[in-house]
Amino acid sequence: MPEAEVLYSDVKFKRHRGNNDGSASSAADTTYSAVRILEKQPSTELPGSQQQSESAPRCRVTSERAAVIVLSVLLAASLVTLGVTSHQNIQNTERLQKMRDECDALMKNLTERFSAVRPESTRPEVNRSSCQRCPDGWERHGGKCYYFSIIKANWTRSRAECRRTGGDLVKIESREEQKFLDQRVRVQMTGEEDKFWIGLTDSEREGAWLWTDGSALDSGLPFWSKGEPDDYKGIHTLGEDCARMGERGGAKELKCWFDASCEVPHRSICERNQKTLTH
């Protein structure tokens, strides 16, 4: 029950006593003062609801203000970072241009000095925009590229595979080249008969050994093993008209060439010129 405030005023009664002679007494005068009752009605709102309703807008305003402040700080930081980066880029560009100018001046100075010392007709032509390299899987040596195959085939098919890649079976033209090939072949051989075809044959005329380009074998650079070539016909009646190389344990004076039947499957050594790459 809700509590009520009740105010009471004093109530006074006036009563006349009766007459001694037994006559009826006059009516009693009764005086009442006003009585007021003040009742406080209970509030229908929950406690704190008014406070929450008043504080809610204030909280929203505070959160929005905080978000604006954070975004402003982030934007300012981004602008500062962008400014610093732009300044650094400008400085780097200026330094790079300065270095280029110095390099150009140095090259011009060297060119002028070189021109004064060496006549124009004797200067080598230099192509600064190109370089030499071998295709992937090929080895570079002495200005040539070499490929040591892993697939065994007869001499004719081996040559066809070399030509398909832009080269041919190797033509050995110096002792240095023979030394290089001998060392590379030895580390790849898995047995005494695991030899490699080279581009030398006397299939057109017995005893006239020619390279694949049609040039004759230089008599001053023979690397035939002892007793070779012997054109042995004990196994192949057509004889031995193609040259192979390889001595797993190494050969004296690099002499590791052998003639063999052109139909025997062997690995091979392909040769080609270096590829010119233009930048």
Image (cartoon, helix red, strand yellow):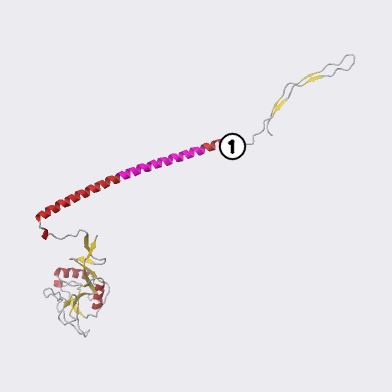
Instruction: Name above or below for residue 18 compared with residue 123.
Output: above
Residue 190 shows up from this direction: no
Picture coordinates of residue 143 (x, y %)? Answer: 18, 65
Quadrant in the picture for residue 238: bottom left
Residue at the limit of the structure toward the top, as seen here: 20
Of the pair 52 and 275, the residue shown nearer to us? 275
Residue at the limit of the structure toward the front, as seen here: 120
Horizontal placement of 108 versus 66: left or right? left
Instruction: Indicate yes or no whether the magenta region holds residue 217.
Output: no
The residue that mark 1 highlights is 49
Of the pair 227 and 55, the residue shown nearer to us? 55
Picture coordinates of residue 156 (x, y %)? Answer: 24, 78
Tell me the crowding category of disc 1: few under 14, some 14 to 19, or many 20 or more residues within 10 angstroms, Cα based: few
Instruction: Name above or below for residue 113 compared with residue 160.
Output: above
Q: How many marks?
A: 1
Residue 71 shows up from this direction: yes
Instruction: Name above or below for residue 182 compared with residue 46.
Output: below
Tell me the magenta residue range: 59-87
Picture coordinates of residue 269 (x, y %)? Answer: 22, 72
Of the pair 13 and 248, the residue shown nearer to us? 13
Residue placed at 40% from the left, 42% from the top?
75
Tag 1's secondary structure?
helix
Instruction: Indicate yes or no whether the magenta region holds residue 69.
Output: yes
Residue placed at 71% from the left, 27% from the top?
37
Picture coordinates of residue 245 (x, y %)? Answer: 19, 74
Q: Quadrant of the C terminus?
A: bottom left
Q: Amino acid at mark 1?
A: Ser
Residue placed at 14% from the left, 51% from the top?
109
Magenta span dominant secondary structure:
helix
Horizontal placement of 27 versus 95: left or right? right
